[in-house]
Image (cartoon, rainbow, N blue to C red):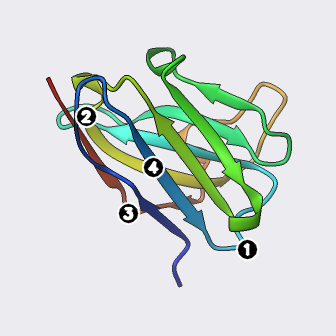
Amino acid sequence: QVQLVESGGGSVQAGGSLRLSCAASAHIYNRECMAWFRQAPGKEREGVAAIYIGGGNTYYVDSVKGRFTISQDNAKSTVYLHMNSLKPEDTAMYYCAADARWRSSGCPGQYEYNYWGQGTQVTVSS
């Protein structure tokens, strides 16, 4: 049973844009957190952006603030990551994650997400 399906990755030049999509099965597109993580070769996986589905609160790692935007479409059970002004250091495999409990301090780290997508590659050339 498919839970999360990512799409939208690709190769772009520095300064370009991409939009990643994460379509969730209805039963896990709940009112809690969904997020995007990324992992570059030889590096640890890091959180990029998260959204609290129930309230629309968004959270970003400092390195992408002002360039990336996470958004939701409840009718499609889909979360998007709009990536602008891409840099070579944004090159990574990007993963969608879902079903982590929101708290007043925000969305949690990666170990609290119960569902993960297969990943989509983003490559930014200089």
Q: Quadrant of residue 28?
A: bottom right
Q: Can you identify the residue that label 3 sits on?
A: 118
Residue 118 at x, y percent in the picture? 38, 63
Look at discs 3 and 2 and give the one toward the viewer.
2
Q: The disc labelled 4 sits on which kind of residue? A: Leu
Find numbered disc 2 in the image and state the secondary structure of the residue it sits on: loop
Q: The disc labelled 3 sits on which kind of residue? A: Gln
Badge 2 crowding class, 10 Å Cα cut-off, few under 14, some 14 to 19, many 20 or more, is many
Q: Can you identify the residue that label 4 sits on?
A: 20
Q: Can you identify the residue that label 2 sits on?
A: 91
Question: Depth check: 99 or 12 in front?
Answer: 12
Residue 120 appears left or right of 51:
left
Mark 3 to mark 4: distance in Å?
Answer: 13 Å
Badge 4 crowding class, 10 Å Cα cut-off, few under 14, some 14 to 19, many 20 or more, is many
* Label located before the other in sequence (2 or 1): 1
* Label located before the other in sequence (3 or 4): 4
* Label located before the other in sequence (3 or 2): 2
Residue 74 at x, y percent in the picture? 76, 59
Find numbered disc 4 in the image and state the secondary structure of the residue it sits on: strand
